[in-house]
Structure formats: structure tokens, C-alpha cells
Image: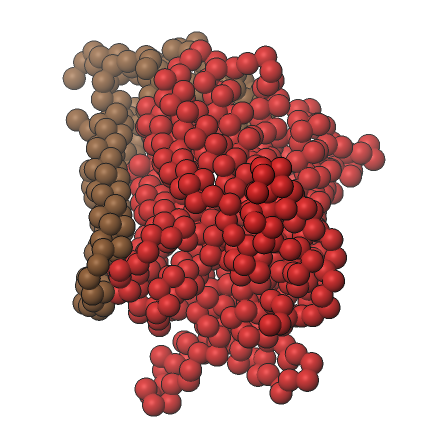
Chain colours: A red, B brown
């Protein structure tokens, strides 16, 4: 097949978009949206890496900070949320062996996430609105530095993403609990109890003979518990967004509301409580659940210590509600008791819950050896390594003593955040994409295994390298969220940029491999309404 | 004498060793899991030992740092200490307003920096001449932001905002703002 034919029709012309079910189209739309926004995030990241080496006339300081503000939000909401939500809206009905509650609502979810992300990204790009994702009060309403109109569109974009995320949560829980048409009545309450873990807790107090079976599979329990944090996070961010919008609308109408009406420290506690439901909640829970699912799919065997794994997911959920104070260890008015209990000791539980998930997955793989080093397996091992590196780095900075010299340095954002997201989370997602690829494409073939190998090595080495060099700069005093104009950390920033370039190349290689596998016609066909009128996940034989 | 430079060096060594070890473990695992041979289930005792080790590590890190990093105890019990010298600093409109052109204290003094923000959330950090960090804290408007520090060696330090406060914040640097001189009397 010629290059042009493959580019148009995909590898061996195997992918036929018109053979897809509405469910398959829905999940592929989510993944395409997720990958497009990942491209946004990785290109923005590369721009920032270059500016960190030395300022350039091509990117003004205002533009740099607008990118710094949009980058994590595009990465988390536009890319990760889209990819994860799409995969889970397919996996929940797949594992529960019943149709998704609403395919229409699922499609609205990706539309709202995509539109909201484009809106806030565009508002930041045009107006340079840049209060960062932290939105420390009263910076988001500082209209001497920022355009009120730019801010209004920016915050509205975030709110639209949150509405889409709320629809995802509703769809997940309705799918778990509802009774499909023509089915025998489903025990909705009991299914919900099993998904959230209350029935598991009740089992602890029952005699062994009277203990009840879990009604939902372990990965669905993980998705449900992570979705609780998604829902709570939606409420917090929406409430905060409305609060900021009140000040913005008042300013547009010519009224200057007193920003001192909001207590900056109370607001910071409130907002970090909500933000941490992502970083220390749903991400860790979703990742652990995905690891468990991948390990059982790769090995075809039961998960090692699965009851403990299930209980740990519940512990992780509770922990995620109580760890926010580790972000306020440098706030001197924050009560010391909160710093020590929430900031240090509860946070240390994450070492235990993530370490336990790490061990369980490795033990499951080990018991099934010899395994073939497939793409899902190698990316899964990469994801495990990512969290094995990033979680201890996080535990170190969540220490009252060490935080005094680590807070807001490149250490935080390098070895902890970027290694967790780029190596831990993203490689886990790539593993899921590689394993789901033949299922959701009705057997399309990957264009090139060599390119998949390049994708793996460049991504792994680029991610670890970037985290390491940023971390070294952080330990030498380099701050995050600022610019150094006199080349103070130039050598380390050049090395971090070279590593960043590896990540960019890895993504371009992967994207090219996927487009050549599906063909341009196929990619376009994903967005054309499905011809098959069925709620089935895959076409009937 | 344990100062912030020594703490950061210790952390660099500890984390680098850990990083190398865990990467080697994963490489070993990746090779072994694809090798021919029977996959024996892992014994639960091994699992529980691992979990126990994580508990000990998670808790002992904080106990260790509390007892070895000199500023931790003083930071958590600031009310129990009387500073030898206090400097009240105001931050407004992206500018540090210092009580004197250069803030001078002696080696061994417990120095209090009390920083008040009149508008935004800022940061307050002291940096050595090689840009490495001595200390930092957040400066939140409407709240008291105070830190105690015992300087162990003479030196001249730069004040820099350690928190983002908008694009204007990158210029919030006061070169050589703090000077620590040798002790003049016992």
C-alpha cells in the first residue's frame, strides 16, 4: 500500500468508521479530543521550557504567564479528563455487562469539555489572563493586571468543563444503578453500596459465612470512588468560579466590590481542598483502578490481594478529603495542628496506598510470567515507575522541615508533578489506549511497532530527564512560577528542554502512528453520526 | 551545624540513591517477567512486610526531620521563642518596603521576619549569592506572616518573592537586603 493510500485509508484499510457502534464512536471522540489537547499542552510546555533557558522577544512575559496558566488546565481537563472519561464511559458498561445509561449525555460530555477548554485557552491566549490555576485570592479579580472580559470568558470556559464533568459523574452512577429496559429490576441501592464500598465495610462486621459478595467489579468500584472526587471537585470549582464571576460582572457594570470581603487564607484552604480532590484523589484512585484492570487484562488472571486492593481504594478516597494542608505548609497562619496532621501524617498515607497498589500490580504480573513485552505491558511498567518516583518526592516535600526550602521550587513541579503526570499517569493512559485500540476500532492494526517502541523510549527518557533536571534546579533554589532573566540556571534548563523535546517527538511519533493506523478518512468518520442504531458496545457478530 | 544547604544536599543524595535503586528494580522486573519459568504466586507475608515498611518509612521521615532539621521545632512553636531581632516588612503593589536599606543581624541571633501584604498573596524568600534558598514563606493578605530564623554563618542575602502575584511579580527582588555579620560580643 502506498504512503498516500495508507494515510487516507489506514493500515491495510482495516479501519472502517461506518462499522463502529455509537459507543465506539463516542469513546474514540473522547480520545481524539484528549490527544489534540495533549498536543496543545506538550507544545505549550516546550515553549515554556525554551523561555526558561532565556527570555525571547517571541514570547512576552505576559504571554508566558498566560501559557503557564492555561497549560496545566488544558493538560488536566482538556486532555486527561477527556481521555479518562471516554475510556471509563466505555469500561463501566463493559464491566457491568449492561448498556451505558445515556450515550447522548456522554457525547455532550466531550463536547462541553472540548468547547470549555477551547474557550478558556482562547481567552488566556488573547487577553493574557493569568492568575494561574491556583487562583490565589484576590489575584483572579486584580483588574489592574488583567482584563475583566478576558477573565470572564476564561472562568466561563472552566465552568463549562465542570458542567461536562458533572454529566460524566451522573452517567457513571446511573449506569451502575439503573435497570435497562426489559431487564429484571436491578438492586440500585446495593449496587451503589458496593461501588462506594459501604457493603465492603459492612462485611468487616459480619461473620465469614454471612459476608456478601461484591456486586460490582473492582475497576468499577475504583471508577465510582474516583467519580465521587470528580463530583466534589466540580462543586468546589463551580462555586469558586461563580464567586469570581460575581466580582467580574460587578466590575463590568462599573461596581468595585471589596476583595477584602473574602478571607484569603480561608479561600486558599477551601480551594486547595477542592484542587487536591484531583491531584491527591481522583488521579490516584483512577490510576490504581486502571492498573488493576490492565494487570488482569494483560495476565488473564485474578488480581493479587483483591479485597485489600478494594479496601485501599476506599481509604484513598477518605485520605483525599483530608490531605489538602500539605499545600499550606509555607503559610504561617495555617494552624500547626493542620500542618502536622493533614499536611504530614495523613499525606504519608498516600505512600502506603499507592505503594500497596504498586505491589499488588507487580505481584499479579509476576504470578503470570512469562509474559510477552507488549505495548500495554511496557507502558504499564512505565506508569508504575512514574508513581514510584513521584510519590516519594511528594512525601518529602509534604514535610514541615523540608517544605521550608522546597515550596514553590522547581522540585515540586519537576520530580513530583511532571513525573507523576507524564510518566505515571500518561504512560498508564497510553497502556489503556494500546489495549483498547483493537476493541474500539473493530480490529484495526497498528501501523508500526517500531514507532510504538520509539514512542515508549522517548517518552520515558524525556519525562524522567525533564523531571530530574527541573528537580536539580529546584534543589539549587530555582523557583517555579517565575522567570530568570540572567541565565542563573541555564545549563539545567537546556538539559530540561532537550528532555522536553524528546517528549514532544514521542507524542508526534505516536500521533503519526495512530493517524496512519486509522487513516484520515477514518479519523474524520469518527465524528460522523453512527449508522448502527444500537446501545451495544461492539457490533453484533 | 545543620543549615538549609546541608539539608538540601542530604535530600539530593537520598533521593538520587532511591531513584537509581527503583529504576534498577523495575528494569530487573521487566526482564524477569518475560523470562521462561513458572510464575509462582507472591506470598502474602511478603506483601504485609512491604506494607509495614511503607508505614514505618512514612511516619519516621517526619520524626527524623523534626529531630534533625533545626528550624522545624522552632517553626511549629514560634510563640515559645523571643526573637533577638525583628524586622517588619510591608509588601504592596509588587514592592517590598523594608524598615531599613539593609537589614543587619548577628550570627546566632534568632531573627523574626514579620511580613504584611496590603493587597495580593506574595511570597517572601531569602537567597544566597549563588541563588540557593535559605528560607521562604507565603505572604497572605489579612493574616500574620512571620518566621523565625537562626543564622549560623555570616553572609549577604537577597529577598525575592517566592509566590506568583501576576507578571509584575518577577521583578520583586531586593538584592543584598539582609546582612548577617559575625557576633560582636558573647
Seen in the image, is A382 located left or right of residue A179? left
Q: Quadrant of the N terminus of chain A?
A: top right
Quadrant location of residue B149? top left
Q: Is residue A153 left or right of residue A352?
A: right
Q: Nearer the viewer, residue A185 or B83?
A: A185
Q: Is residue A140 left or right of residue B25?
A: right
Q: Give the answer, above or below, for where A222 lies relative to A111.
A: below
Residue A422 seen in the current view: no
In the depicted structure, whether residue A494 falls above or below residue B121: above
* Picture residue at 37% right of the left edge, 68% below the top: A300
Q: Where does residue B43 sit, x and y in percent of width and height?
A: 19, 68
Return the x and y of residue A71 as percentages of the image width and height: 56, 35
**Residue A112 shown left or right of residue B154 in the figure:** right
Where is residue A127 shown, x and y percent of the image?
Answer: 70, 27
Could one spot residue A373 in this view of the protein? yes
How many marks overall? 0
Taking the view exactly as shown, the residue that stands out farthest to the front is A1
Nearest the viewer among A352 and A437 is: A437
Q: Position of residue B1 (x, y in %)?
A: 17, 26
Name of the residue lying farthest toward the bottom? A209
Q: Residue at x 41, y 60 (%)?
A: A294
Please report the residue visible at 45 percent of the width from the left and 18 percent of the height from the top: A53
- Tell me which corner region of the image, top left, top right, bottom left or bottom right, holds residue A451: top left
Which picture quadrant has residue A264? top right
Q: Nearer the viewer, residue A536 or A165?
A: A536
**Residue at figure coordinates x 66%, y 61% from the top left:** A19
Give the position of the C terminus of chain A as an image quadrant: bottom right
In-front residue for pair A362/B84 = A362
Amino acid at each position: 500500500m502506498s504512503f498516500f493510500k495508507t494515510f487516507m485509508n489506514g493500515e491495510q484499510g482495516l479501519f472502517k468508521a461506518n462499522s463502529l457502534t455509537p459507543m465506539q464512536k463516542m469513546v474514540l471522540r473522547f480520545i481524539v479530543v484528549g490527544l489534540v489537547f495533549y498536543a496543545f499542552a506538550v507544545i505549550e510546555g516546550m515553549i515554556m521550557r525554551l523561555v526558561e533557558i532565556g527570555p525571547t522577544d517571541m514570547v512576552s512575559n505576559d504571554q508566558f504567564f498566560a501559557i503557564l496558566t492555561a497549560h496545566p488546565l488544558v493538560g488536566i481537563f482538556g486532555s486527561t479528563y477527556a481521555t479518562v472519561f471516554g475510556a471509563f464511559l466505555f469500561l463501566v458498561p463493559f464491566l457491568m455487562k449492561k448498556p451505558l445509561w445515556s450515550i447522548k449525555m456522554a457525547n455532550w460530555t466531550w463536547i462541553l469539555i472540548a468547547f470549555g477548554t477551547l474557550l478558556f485557552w482562547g481567552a488566556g491566549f488573547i487577553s493574557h489572563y493569568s492568575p494561574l490555576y491556583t487562583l490565589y485570592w484576590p489575584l483572579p479579580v486584580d483588574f489592574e493586571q488583567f482584563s475583566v472580559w478576558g477573565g470572564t470568558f476564561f472562568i466561563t470556559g472552566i465552568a463549562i468543563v465542570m458542567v461536562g464533568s458533572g454529566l460524566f459523574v451522573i452517567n457513571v452512577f446511573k449506569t451502575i444503578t439503573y435497570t435497562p429496559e426489559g431487564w429484571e429490576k436491578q438492586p440500585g441501592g446495593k449496587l451503589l453500596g458496593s461501588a462506594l464500598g459501604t457493603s465492603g465495610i459492612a462485611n468487616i462486621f459480619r461473620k465469614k459465612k454471612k459476608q456478601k459478595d461484591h456486586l460490582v467489579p473492582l475497576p468499577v468500584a475504583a471508577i465510582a470512588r474516583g467519580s465521587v472526587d470528580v463530583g466534589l471537585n466540580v462543586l468546589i470549582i463551580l462555586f469558586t468560579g461563580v464567586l469570581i464571576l460575581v466580582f467580574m460582572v460587578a466590575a463590568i457594570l462599573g461596581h468595585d466590590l471589596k476583595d477584602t470581603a473574602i478571607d484569603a487564607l480561608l479561600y486558599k484552604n477551601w480551594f486547595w481542598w477542592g484542587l487536591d480532590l484531583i491531584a491527591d484523589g481522583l488521579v490516584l484512585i483512577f490510576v490504581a483502578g486502571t492498573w488493576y484492570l490492565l494487570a488482569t487484562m494483560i495476565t488473564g488472571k485474578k488480581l493479587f490481594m483483591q479485597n485489600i486492593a478494594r479496601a485501599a481504594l476506599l481509604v484513598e478516597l477518605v485520605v483525599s478529603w483530608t490531605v489538602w494542608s500539605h499545600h499550606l505548609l509555607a503559610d504561617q497562619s495555617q494552624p500547626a495542628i493542620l500542618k502536622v496532621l493533614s499536611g504530614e501524617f495523613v499525606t504519608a498515607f498516600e505512600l502506603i496506598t499507592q505503594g500497596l497498589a504498586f505491589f499488588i500490580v507487580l505481584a499479579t504480573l509476576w504470578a503470570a510470567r512469562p509474559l510477552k513485552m507488549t505495548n500495554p505491558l511496557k507502558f504499564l511498567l512505565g506508569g508504575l515507575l512514574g508513581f514510584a518516583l513521584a510519590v516519594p518526592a511528594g512525601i518529602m516535600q509534604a514535610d514541615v522541615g523540608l517544605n521550608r526550602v522546597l515550596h514553590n521550587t522547581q522540585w515540586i513541579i519537576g520530580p513530583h508533578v511532571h513525573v507523576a503526570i507524564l510518566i505515571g499517569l500518561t504512560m498508564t493512559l497510553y497502556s489503556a489506549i494500546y489495549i483498547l485500540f483493537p476493541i474500539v476500532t473493530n480490529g484495526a492494526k497498528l501501523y508500526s511497532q517500531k514507532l510504538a517502541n520509539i514512542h515508549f523510549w522517548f517518552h520515558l527518557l524525556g519525562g524522567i530527564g525533564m523531571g530530574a533536571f527541573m528537580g536539580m534546579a529546584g534543589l539549587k533554589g530555582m523557583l517555579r512560577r517565575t522567570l530568570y532573566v540572567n541565565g542563573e540556571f541555564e545549563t539545567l534548563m537546556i538539559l530540561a528542554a532537550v528532555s522536553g523535546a524528546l517528549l514532544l517527538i514521542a507524542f508526534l511519533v505516536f500521533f503519526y502512528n495512530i493517524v496512519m493506523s486509522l487513516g484520515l478518512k477514518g479519523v474524520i468518520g469518527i465524528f460522523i453520526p453512527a449508522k448502527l442504531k444500537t446501545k451495544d458496545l461492539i457490533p453484533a457478530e | 551545624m545543620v543549615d538549609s544547604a546541608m539539608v538540601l544536599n542530604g535530600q539530593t543524595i537520598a533521593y538520587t540513591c532511591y531513584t537509581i535503586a527503583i529504576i534498577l528494580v523495575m528494569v530487573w522486573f521487566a526482564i524477569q517477567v518475560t523470562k521462561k519459568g513458572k510464575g509462582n504466586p507472591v506470598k502474602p507475608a511478603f506483601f504485609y512486610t512491604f506494607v509495614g515498611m511503607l508505614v514505618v518509612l512514612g511516619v519516621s521521615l517526619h520524626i527524623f526531620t523534626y529531630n534533625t532539621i533545626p528550624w522545624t521545632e522552632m517553626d511549629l512553636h514560634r510563640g515559645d521563642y523571643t526573637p533577638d531581632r525583628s524586622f517588619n516588612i510591608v509588601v504592596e503593589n509588587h514592592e517590598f518596603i523594608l524598615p531599613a536599606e539593609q537589614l543587619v543581624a548577628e550570627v546566632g541571633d534568632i531573627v523574626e521576619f514579620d511580613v504584611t501584604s496590603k493587597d495580593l498573596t506574595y511570597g517572601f524568600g531569602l537567597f544566597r549569592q549563588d541563588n540557593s534558598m535559605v528560607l521562604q514563606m507565603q505572604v497572605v493578605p489579612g493574616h500574620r506572616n512571620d518566621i523565625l530564623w537562626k543564622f549560623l554563618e555570616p553572609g549577604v542575602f537577597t529577598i525575592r518573592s517566592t509566590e506568583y502575584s501576576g507578571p509584575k511579580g518577577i521583578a520583586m527582588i531586593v538584592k543584598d537586603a539582609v546582612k548577617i555579620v559575625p557576633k560582636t560580643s558573647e
